[in-house]
Image (tube, coloured by chain):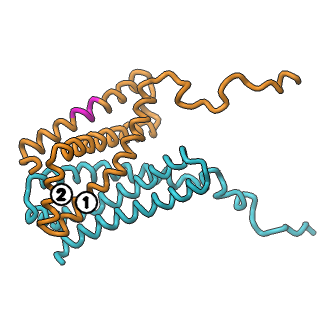
Amino acid sequence: MAEAKVPAERPLSPHLTIYRPVLSMMMSIVHRITGAALYIGTLLLVWWLLAAVSGPGAYAVFQSAAASFFGRIVLFGYTWALIHHMLGGIRYLIWDTGRGFGAAEREWLLRANLVGSILLTIILWVVGGYLMGGLR
Amino acid sequence: MSPRPSNMRTPLGRVRGHGSAKSGTEDFIRQRLTAIANIPLTIAAVLIVISLIGRNHAAVVQILGSTPVAIVMVLFIISIFYHMRIGMQAIIEDYVHEERAKYALLILNTFFAIAAGFSSIYAILKLSFGV
C-alpha cells in the first residue's frame, strides 16, 4: 500500500514535447495551423468581395495590394494552406470510414497530401498567372 | 406506493449537456458535413477566383453577380464560415483553459464568423441584385 503513495515518475499529462516527431503527427499539426491561417485569411476574401461591391476605386486598391510582392507571397501561402487543408481533410474523411490505417497506406496518404498540395498550388499559380492573365 | 421522486428529470436528462465540451456530437458531425460540402464548393470557388483575377472591376462585378456564380459563392461562404467556426472553437477549447478568456474567445469566434460570413454574403447579393 505504501508504494501507491509514491508520485509517478512518468509525465502525468503527456503532450507533444515528449513524443518523437512522426509524419502523421507533423501533418496533424500542420492541418490545424493551416486551418487557423485560413480562418484569418477569410479577411482577404471579405476584403475582395467588399472592394468589388464598393466600386472601381476600392477594387483598384485591392488589386494593387494583391499584385504587390508581399501580396503575391501572402496569396501563394493562402493557396497552399487551402489546398493542403482540403487534401488533409479528405485524408481525415477517408480515415473516418476506418480505411487507410495500415502502415503503408497511412504513409502514402500523408505523402500524397503533402506532395499533392505543393504540386496543385504550383499548377494553380501557373494556370492563374500565365494562362488566365494573372494578378494585375 | 412508490416513493415520490424529488424532481421529474431522469438521470440521463440531468447529465446531458454537462460534459467537458458542454455539448454532444453535433459539432463533430457538422464539422464533417461542412468538410464534405467544402470540397466541391472550394474547387468551384477557386476556379471562379482564378477566372476573375486578371479581369477589371466591371467584369468581376458582372461575373460575381451572375446567378450561378453568386449561388455557388454564397453556398461556399456559408459552408466555410460554419466549418471554420467549429474548427476555431476546438482550437480555443484545447489551448485556453482560463474560463473567462475561453468564453470571451468563443464569443468572439462566433461573432467573427457571423460578421465576416454575412458581410461576404451581403456583398455577393448586392452585386447579384445590382442595387
Q: Is residue A116 magenta?
A: yes
Q: Amino acid at mark 1?
A: Trp
Q: Which residue is mark 2?
A: A62
> What secondary structure is marked by label 2?
helix
- Whether residues under marks 1 and 2 lie with C-beta atoms below 8 angstroms apart, the answer is yes
Apparent side of residue B89 relative to residue A78 in the rendered image (left or right): right
Which circle marks residue B74 in the picture? none
What amino acid is labelled 2 in the image?
A: Phe
- In the image, the chain rendered in cyan is B
Relative to B59, say whether A74 is above or below: above
Number of residue marks: 2
- Which residue appears at 39% of the width and 39% of the height? A31
Q: Of all residues shown, which one is farthest toward the right?
A: B1
Q: Nearer the viewer, residue B125 or A91?
A: B125
Residue under pointer 1: A47
The crowding category of the residue bearing disc 1, from other C-alpha atoms within 10 Å (few below 14, some 14 to 19, many at least 20), is some
Residue at the far bottom in the pictured view = B131
Residue B131 versus residue A58: which sits nearer the camera? A58
Q: Position of residue A30 (x, y in %)?
A: 39, 36
Residue B13 sits inside the magenta stretch? no
Image quarter where the N terminus of chain B lies is bottom right
Residue shown at the point (38%, 49%) measured from the top left: B35
Q: Residue at x 83, y 25 (%)?
A: A4
Residue A98 is situated, as x and y percent measured from the top left of the image, at 47, 35
The 10 Å Cα crowd at callout 2, few under 14, some 14 to 19, many 20 or more, is: some
Asked where in the image residue B78 lies, by quadrant, the reply is bottom left
Give the x, y percent position of residue B50. Answer: 15, 50
Same subunit: marks 1 and 2: yes
Tag 2, which chain? Answer: A
Q: Which chain is orange?
A: A
Q: Which residues are magenta?
A: A115-119
